[in-house]
Amino acid sequence: MKNRKQEDIIAEKIVKYYDYFEENSITTISKKCAKYIVNEYFEDICSNNFEIPSSEVIEEWVLEEVKHQFDEKVVEIIENTCPSMTEDEIDEQITKLEKMYERENKKQISAAANLASKELKSRIKSLQKDLIELRKKYVN
């Protein structure tokens, strides 16, 4: 019962005091993911050998970004709320909270993935337009 009470306290602090999705809006997360994909596949994009990943793949990247930011914030909350917890207990708590958060915010994660896909397409289009201009300027 004591562990459940700690989970409730921690979850309440995350939602009430840190407003996770307010601070780390789906727009910000989607832009970070699009930027990451462009950086990761820059050469392929420049050589027109890049295909937009499926929505499932983009959603996985969004979820990883959410988890990364979530972990950074939640570890601090847990350590401050329950200073007697061991690292293993903290890791276990984070895993539980991640799963709970993912279930409760599935719609926001999907929305962030859709925005990331649109942002990615926009960045690629802009990059390819810039490349065409550079080729015209320096090749012709």
Image (cartoon, helix red, strand yellow):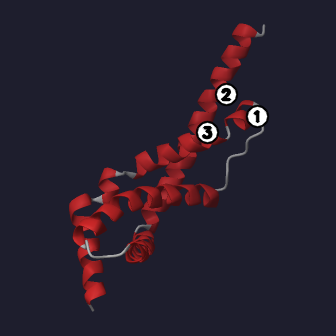
Circles 1 and 2 in contact, beta carbons < 8 Å: yes
Picture residue at 45% right of the left edge, 49% below the top: 29
Q: CA distance from mark 3 to mark 2?
A: 12 Å
Quarter holding the C terminus? top right
**How far across and how far down the image is residue 91, in percent?**
43, 72
**How far across and how far down the image is residue 114, in percent?**
53, 53
The first of marks 3 and 2 along the sequence is 3
The first of marks 3 and 1 along the sequence is 3
Tag nearer the camera, 3 or 1: 3
Residue type at mark 2: give it. Gln
Question: Residue under circle 2?
Answer: 128
Q: CA distance from mark 1 to mark 2?
A: 8 Å
Tag nearer the camera, 3 or 2: 3
Q: Secondary structure at mark 3?
A: helix
Q: Nearer the viewer, residue 17 or 84?
A: 84
The first of marks 1 and 2 along the sequence is 1
Question: Residue under circle 3?
Answer: 38
**How far across and how far down the image is residue 68, in percent?**
46, 57
115 lies above or below 16: above
- The numbered mark at residue 48 is 1
Q: Nearer the viewer, residue 82 or 65?
A: 82
**How far across and how far down the image is residue 70, in percent?**
39, 60
Picture residue at 70% right of the left edge, 20% below the top: 132
How crowded pointer 3 is (Cα within 10 Å; few <14, some 14-19, many 20+) is rated as many
Quarter of the image for residue 78 reads bottom left
**Quick check: 56 left or right of 113?**
right
Quarter holding the N terminus? bottom left
How crowded pointer 2 is (Cα within 10 Å; few <14, some 14-19, many 20+) is rated as some
Q: CA distance from mark 3 to mark 1?
A: 12 Å
Q: Residue at the far bottom: name it.
A: 1
Picture residue at 73% right of the left edge, 45% below the top: 51
Residue type at mark 1: give it. Asn
